[in-house]
Image: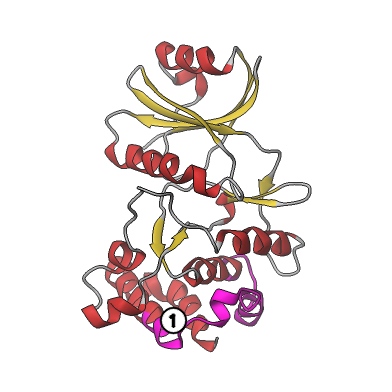
Amino acid sequence: MARVDWAGLPVAVRAAVEARAGAVRAVEDVPHGITCRFAAVLSTSGGRLFVKGVPADDAWGRTGQTMEAAVNTAVTAVSPRLLWRVEAGGWDLVAFEAVEARHADLSPGSADLLLVAAVLEEAQGLKAPAGVELSQYVDRELGGAVSAAERELLLGDALLHTDTNPHNLLVGAERAFLVDWALPAAGPAWVDVAEAAMRLMDAGCSAMEALAWAAGFKSWVSADPAAVELFVRVTCRTRVARLGERGARPWNAQLEALLRK
């Protein structure tokens, strides 16, 4: 669906934002993010903030924002703090502290790789806040493709981000941030490491370079090889079902490289 800019939002929506944040003086559109229809950094009389939103009838988008708000208290060590959420003019919006940062460079030799590793390492120990029920990663992503015995191998209680692409990894002057927690799940902590390693390969790192980077994480080093093999095998199979043999080939080649662990 098409994105909407600040000027394209209903008057009631803009009024609701300014009632909380102050008069908007400048807008920097953010074109990325799969769960929102509007996203921008707003410079207001009250300061800078990041606001994103979806139409109130977008059930999937609202679910993402609800989950992001629900886990925010648990992720503020690695992600900006939630400021407020409001529904107005047929839209549901959430606002976060704005950070001075850019998208991470995950290419070979990038200095960002150390900062990204640091923030992901900090995220490895996160748990969902009390009272927040998360789907198990294996059920949400691989449900129906594993047996009951296989499912046990992929259960875990780590709070997973599950979408560690460069648009969700922001790098500032001294640290990185892991943003957009709209798709959290529970599972083994190494799953986020595996997915991030594949992003490194997307950015041009060799399998050897990506695996050397992943080897800096205790969860990856200690992961049960049988669980990793199951994760790779079943994920490859589900991608073939979704994309076809040819379409899934490059993705699955990256996944299979993880078996060299």
Check the image and report above or below for 69 versus 153. above
Range drawn in magenta: 201-230
Asked if the stretch drawn in magenta spans residue 232, the answer is no
Is any part of residue 63 visible from this angle? yes
* 115 relative position to 232: left or right: right
Q: Residue at x 39, y 77 (%)?
A: 231
Q: Position of residue 10 (x, y in %)?
A: 40, 15
Relative horizontal placement of residue 157, taking residue 214 as reference (left or right): left
In the figure, 76 relative to 87: above or below? Answer: below
Q: Which quarter shows the C terminus?
A: bottom right
Residue 234 pos. (x, y %): 33, 77
Q: Is residue 230 left or right of residue 32?
A: left
- Comparing 167 with 82, the one in front is 82
Q: Amino acid at mark 1?
A: Val
- Dominant secondary structure (helix, strand or loop) of the stretch shown in magenta: helix
User: What is the x, y in percent for residue 248?
Assistant: 38, 72
Q: Quadrant of residue 1?
A: top left
Q: Where is residue 54, by image quadrant?
A: top left
Circle 1 sits in a helix, a strand or a loop, which is it? Answer: helix
Where residue 104 appears, as percent x and y from the top left, is 66, 54
Residue at the extreme front of the image, as rendered: 130
For image coordinates 50% across by 43% down, the residue present is 73
Please tell me in which quadrant of the rendered image residue 100 appears: top right
Q: Which residue is mark 1?
A: 228
Q: Is residue 157 above or below residue 252?
A: above
Look at 50% across and 67% down and name the residue there: 195
